[in-house]
Image (tube, grey):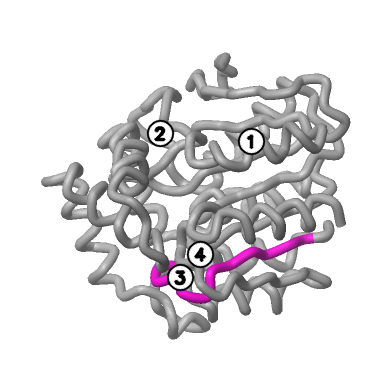
Amino acid sequence: MYYIKTNDQVKIAVYEYNSKGIETVVLLHGWPLSSAIFEYQLPLLIENHYRVIALDMRGFGASDTPAGGYCYDRMAEDLYNVVCALRLQQFTLVGFSMGGAVALRYMRKFRSFGVKKLILLSAASPSLVQGPGNPCGLSKNYLDGLIQLACTDRPKLAENFSRQLFALPQSVAVIDWFRLIALSASGLGTVQGAIALREENGLDDLSCVKVPTFIIHGDKDQIVSNELAEIQHQYIGGSELFTLANSGHGVMYDQLQPFNQCFLKALQS
């Protein structure tokens, strides 16, 4: 792990694996987690000769926790700073949940700079909150409740969220692992990230995607609805949508082997 400093002097933790890989994959985690969630995809990527760059977004994991900058524009700029510092070209950008929304903002704000392919995993886009064009989102009251809990009992928030990730029964140990990852986030990043999820709308981001795009979604996702995945598919021209019938929001783990097969297919397509 090493740090790359952004243009507003925030240190972003970057994890690089298999530096001699033939192609590069960049991984963005979701809220309120870190790059650790991709643990069970790393062997797959390395075995198939990919160079992997995984980031902890500001306020999460081992990255700095600044006072501000938790909007999608700024987090997309953090990614751009990393891409430029490492001189990445022709890479596949992978974003899970809020990381998917940030990836989409990157595609619009920086005109897909360096990206040859986009893979969205349970992406929180265009908006998690119910509103015009999104009648199937979460209620604003629900997001308000998450923010309030993050402000008063973040350990309880981490416990609740970890249980909501999965549609299939998972071991107590696995759920506890995700809880600990959630607790590795800063309190400030958790609260401000949740506010971004409540306030941001990325509908304009979708139509700016001009690279091959693969959307992988869990049919039983209770956080990002199937309707949101369909909106992404509709607005991103030529995109392909893969649905895992028995997965929830934690799509990269709920059906681990089917997901990895689907993920590798998307990478190799």
Q: Secondary structure at mark 1?
A: helix
Q: Position of residue 18 (x, y in %)?
A: 74, 23
Residue type for callout 3: Asp
Q: Secondary structure at mark 4?
A: loop
Residue closest to the eye, 18 or 89: 18
> Looking at the image, is mark 4 or mark 3 earlier in the sequence?
4
Q: What span is colored magenta in the figure? A: 213-223
Residue type for callout 1: Leu
> Is 58 included in the stretch rendered in magenta?
no
Disc 2 crowd rating (10 Å Cα; few below 14, some 14-19, many 20+) is: many
Q: Which residue is mark 4?
A: 201
Q: Which residue is mark 1?
A: 42
Q: Which residue is mark 2?
A: 60
Residue type for callout 2: Phe
Q: Which residue is at a point 53% across and 59% down the rendered structure image?
A: 251
> Is 218 included in the stretch rendered in magenta?
yes
Q: Which mark is residue 137?
A: none
